[in-house]
Amino acid sequence: MSDGTVGERRPVALVTGAGRSAGIAASVVLRLARDGWDVAFTHWTPYDARMEWGAEPGAAGALRERAADLGARTYAVEADLADPAAPARLFDAAERELGGVTALVLCHCESVDSGLLDTTVESFDLHFAVNARATWLLIREYGLRFRGTHGTGRVISLTSDHTVGNLPYGASKGAMDRITLAAARELAHLGVTCNAVNPGPVDTGWMSEEHRADMVRATPLGRLGVPGDCANLVGFLCSAEGGWVNGQLLLSNGGIG
């Protein structure tokens, strides 16, 4: 069921990959809620459970409560985006609970380290299914359904340029870039802007102390990125003021070298 109070209709955003309170997607959900959006979001507990940080029971419910405190109606759904049928079901549910989707923000990922010589075919295929194919299917579903005012639609994907030692992740994110940037042209008749954002290394709890220190030294500003840094850019891109930014791969990484 959706949360929030009844009042003036707010635009609806769909955010993928918000399974952890420390993640970028959770910050995006809260930023959009603060900016006047209702937000549907996905999470996929089996992915978190097999990663080193583990599943976070109750994270989705807590995020809904925090967004509701900001005036947003919310809807959260478990979604395995490796399933090609999931995007249509997800849009059906979001539209039923909140209304037509105006902004699609793709924060989900499959990310398991492996290199050129030791990546398995199964891992490679799963990365492309989640990071590239699901991106295409979600954007396709969005494009087929969008009925908003010309110039208000938004598609934003979060990407990465990390490939060394993380081959299937980086390669599939590269495919995500191209799909998103192609959409800027192919959805032009709808008045939808489409951009990819590379936030650089963001400390969401996965870094070792050594890695964290290396990243701080490599960044001119002398600090790590935090989820709110990326969420602030997403919020701007989703706003009316951000409507002239289109078809771009944006580096929002503090100038890391």
Image: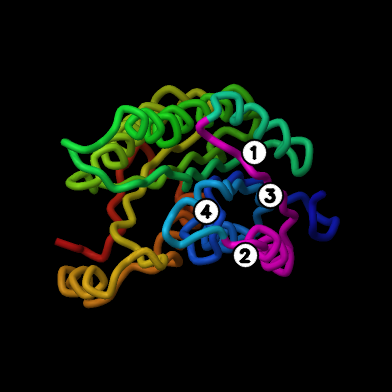
Q: Quadrant of residue 122?
A: top left
Residue 177 position within the rendered picture, expressed as x and y whole percent measured from the top left: 33, 36
| The label number, if any, that marks residue 232 in the structure image | none
Viewer-side label of 4, 1: 4
The image's mark for residue 101 is: 1
User: Which residue is more in the foreground, 81 or 87?
Assistant: 81
* Cβ–Cβ under 8 Å for marks 3 and 4: no
Residue 16, how many percent across, how many down? 54, 45
- Across and down, in percent, residue 13 comes to 61, 46
Which of the two marks, 3 or 4, is nearer to us in this view? 4
- Dot 2 falls on a residue whose secondary structure is helix
* Circle 1 residues within 10 Å: few <14, some 14–19, many ≥20: many
Can residue 240 be seen by looking at this rendering? no
Amino acid type assigned to the residue bearing label 1 in the image: Val
Q: Earlier in the sequence, mark 4 or mark 2?
A: 2
- The residue where tag 3 is placed is 76
Residue 131 in view: yes
Reply yes or no: does residue 66 show up in magenta. yes
Residue 61 lies in the magenta stretch: yes
Q: Earlier in the sequence, mark 1 or mark 3?
A: 3
Which callout, 3 or 4, points at the residue further toward the start of the chain? 4
Secondary structure under badge 1?
strand
Marker disc for residue 34: 2
Q: Earlier in the sequence, mark 4 or mark 1?
A: 4
The residue under the point 29% across, 57% down is 200
- Name the residue tied to disc 4: 49
